[in-house]
Image: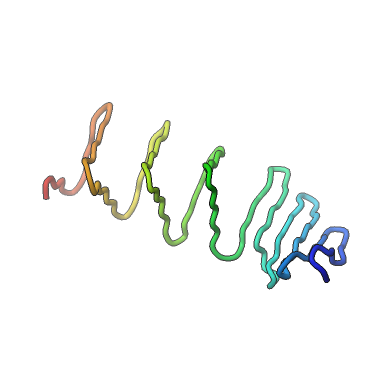
């Protein structure tokens, strides 16, 4: 079968063979449509499910890299990011965190380090330190 040639289709599934033995599959379901890209082993590399609530994007396989020469923006009602083993946010420039509401940070232990320069803490109201011991200049 040649690249781009469609395989036999059923009423609810269409398959097109792509380069490197990959396949494009479009499935029609009662409540959604699903577009899938399958790798040469038949595993899902990319799945886009079109639902009444909007598209659902799923990526399979190994690592994912998003690269752009310009800006990357994500805008949503709510954003959640979860790393199952570890998470790192890095930049070669300045890093800004800002919230109109509160910021809550919780961990088993926390370390704040300034390799060069001061650490400034400013509050409109009280600054509270609560610990078993408060150690200064140790």
Colour setup of the view:
rainbow
Q: Residue at x 25, y 49 (%)?
A: 113
Residue furthest out toward the left: 137
- Viewer-closest of 112 and 114: 114
Total labels: the figure holds 0
Residue 46 image point, x, y percent: 66, 59
Q: Residue at x 11, y 50 (%)?
A: 138
In the figure, is residue 37 to the left or right of 10?
A: left
Q: Residue at x 23, y 46 (%)?
A: 116
- Viewer-closest of 124 and 21: 21
Residue 52 image point, x, y percent: 73, 43
Residue furthest out toward the top: 124
Residue 67 image point, x, y percent: 54, 52
Residue 97 image point, x, y percent: 39, 39
In the figure, is residue 21 to the left or right of 11?
A: left
Quarter the N terminus occupies = bottom right
Q: Quadrant of residue 6?
A: bottom right
């Amino acid at each position: 079968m040649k690249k781009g040639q469609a395989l036999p289709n059923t009423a609810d599934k269409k398959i097109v063979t792509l380069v490197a033995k990959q396949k494009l599959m479009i499935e029609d379901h009662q409540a959604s449509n699903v577009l899938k890209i399958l790798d040469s082993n038949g595993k899902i590399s990319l799945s886009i499910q079109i639902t009444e609530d909007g598209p659902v994007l799923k990526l399979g396989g190994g690592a994912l890299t998003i690269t752009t020469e310009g800006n990357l923006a994500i805008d949503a009602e709510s954003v959640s990011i979860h790393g199952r083993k570890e998470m790192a946010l890095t930049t070669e420039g300045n890093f800004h965190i800002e919230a109109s509401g509160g910021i809550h940070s919780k961990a088993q232990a926390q370390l704040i380090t300034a390799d060069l320069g001061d650490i400034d803490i400013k509050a409109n109201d009280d600054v509270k330190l609560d610990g078993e011991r408060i150690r200064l200049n140790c």
